[in-house]
Each structure stands twice: as structure tokens, then as C-alpha cells.
Image: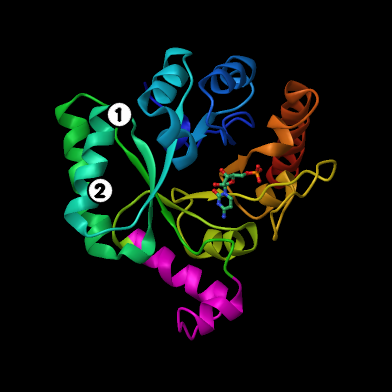
Amino acid sequence: MGIAFNNKNLSAKDRIVLALDTDSLEEVERLVKLLKDYVGCFKVGPQLFLACGYDAIDLIKNNGANVYFDAKFHDIPSTVAKAASTLVKRGITTFSAHLAGGSKMLKTTAKVARETAKKFNQPTPTILGVTLLSSFGQRTLTEELNVRMNIDEYVSHLTYLAQESKIDGVIASASEAKKIRKEFSDEFIILCPAIRPTWSVVNDQIRVVTPADAIRAGVDYMVVGRPITAAEDPIAAANLIIDEIEEASKIIEV
Ligand code: C5P
């Protein structure tokens, strides 16, 4: 199944990546059936995958919906490349890897994933690089990782690595997205987490932005979880976000 990720002609719905943070297959089925017409794809992470494995993936795909596997791979090149190849063979062609894994890991993984996709007649993979986890602040970056750059510079530096390694895009916060959008081509994908519409609860996210702010910053896709899944009416919540994205996109076009 082709997925919306490497298509830049995006509708507001396409831009929403719904985080399936659950370990229950019944909950996955409920959310996918309810929301597949209101979001572009469903994000599967370790919690769900370790609990339900490929049953969760198959359930999403069998409902005609798209999957983004938030693998956040970070290992030696051959290990990540083989894992990516396994995913692609199973029809999971959009996934993430840490940019801190280095260009050799990224290039090898991209090459192997693309070759596997061709061989098994799957869509061309879309690989997104994790820049800096949003749980990091400047102090932890400087003191724990001993990185002498400020966060924006470090994220830009890693984004150059992503581009140089010929992967498809990065995961970054909206504040960093502005700089990335200026420095890199429009083709380069930016996915942004920690999205909070003004009407929603912040939960445990720290540096949150609204869907409109994300669009204004040049973000292509936004990960949204609890503002939709925990809403009393998830469809109404998704529609509010779609409206907000559409409004912000119109202003940009003018
Ligand atoms: O919208 P909500 O806070 O519920 O979204 C949670 C999801 O966002 C989780 O699946 C988490 O993995 C993801 N996330 C992310 N990158 C971050 C922060 C959160 O992908 N930097």
C-alpha cells in the first residue's frame, strides 16, 4: 500500500500522524476504525509492537490505513539495515532511525531498505531521522552528551547528516523546523511531535506547539496522540485539528 509520506501534495488529514500508544489490539481496532478517515497514518511504537507484534500492523493495514513504525533504530549499520529489511519485507516502509547512529548506519540502512522494497515489490521506503529527543534540554545536551553546540545548531548539524545520507526527512520540534525549512529543500520531510491545540491538555509534553504554529514553521506531518485519542469525541477533535491546519495553510498560501 502506498502511503502519504513521500507525497508533498498534502491534505490537512494527510498531515496528521495518530500515535497509537496502547498495548491492546481491541483499542487499536477501535481507534483505526473510528479515525482512519480523519488522519493520514497511524504511528506504531515499541509499546504496541512489543505487546501485539505484527497483528497490530496487519490490523491497521487490513483496514486500509497507513502505518508509520517509530522504530527509532540506533545500532551498528548491518544490524539496523537487516532490521529495516525485515520491516520492508513485511510491508512496513515508513520508519525512523536515530541520526546519532551516524552516516554509515543511515546510508547502509537506506540502501538495503530500498533494495529490499524493489525486490519484494513494496513502495519506496520513507526513512525519517530522529534529531534530538524532546526530553533533552540544553543542559543535558551540554553536560551529559558533552555537545558544545546549542540545540538549534545541533539539530541543523544532524539534519545535514540526514540529507547527506540521503534519507527522506527528520523528526524535529517546530522551533527547529523553521530553521530546517529555510536551510533545506522543500522536498525534505519534517515531522513534528508534541502537538497541542489550544483546547487540549498538555499532559507530560514539555515544548508543545499548536497545529497552526507547526504549519507556519514549515512542518509537513505532526504526531498527535492524546488530544485526539483521549478526547470525549475523537472525531470532533480530529476535525478541529484538520480545520486549524487548513486555516493556517491558507494564510501561508496568501
Ligand atoms: O500527543 P501525545 O503527547 O499523546 O503523543 C505522544 C506520542 O508522541 C508518543 O507516541 C511519543 O512517542 C511521540 N513523541 C515523539 N517524539 C517526541 C515526543 C513524543 O514521537 N519528541
Quarter placement of the N terminus = top left
Q: Going by the picture, which residue comes out furthest to the right?
A: 199
* Percent of width and height locating residue 207: 69, 60
Residue pictured at 59% horizontal, 22% vertical: 27
* Percent of width and height locating residue 189: 47, 48
Vertical order, 142 against 231 (above or below): below
Residue pictured at 70% horizontal, 53% vertical: 204
* Percent of width and height locating residue 4: 47, 30
Mark 2 lies on a secondary structure that is helix
Is residue 147 magenta-colored? yes
* Percent of width and height locating residue 120: 18, 25
Vertical order, 130 against 197 (above or below): below
Q: Amino acid at mark 2?
A: Ala
Residue pictured at 26% horizontal, 26% vertical: 122
Quarter placement of the C terminus = top right
Name the chief secondary structure element in magenta. Answer: helix
Q: Quadrant of residue 225?
A: top right
Q: Quadrant of residue 123?
A: top left
Residue pictured at 59% horizontal, 14% vertical: 33
The label number, if any, that marks residue 18 in the structure image: none
What is the CA distance from the residue labelled 1 to the residue labelled 2? 13 Å
Residue 84 in the figure: left or right of residue 32: left
Is residue 111 magenta-colored? no
The magenta segment: 137-163
Residue 182 in the figure: left or right of residue 59: right
Display colour scheme: rainbow
Residue placed under numbered mark 2 in the picture: 110
Q: Earlier in the sequence, mark 1 or mark 2?
A: 2
Mark 1 lies on a secondary structure that is loop
Residue placed under numbered mark 1 in the picture: 123
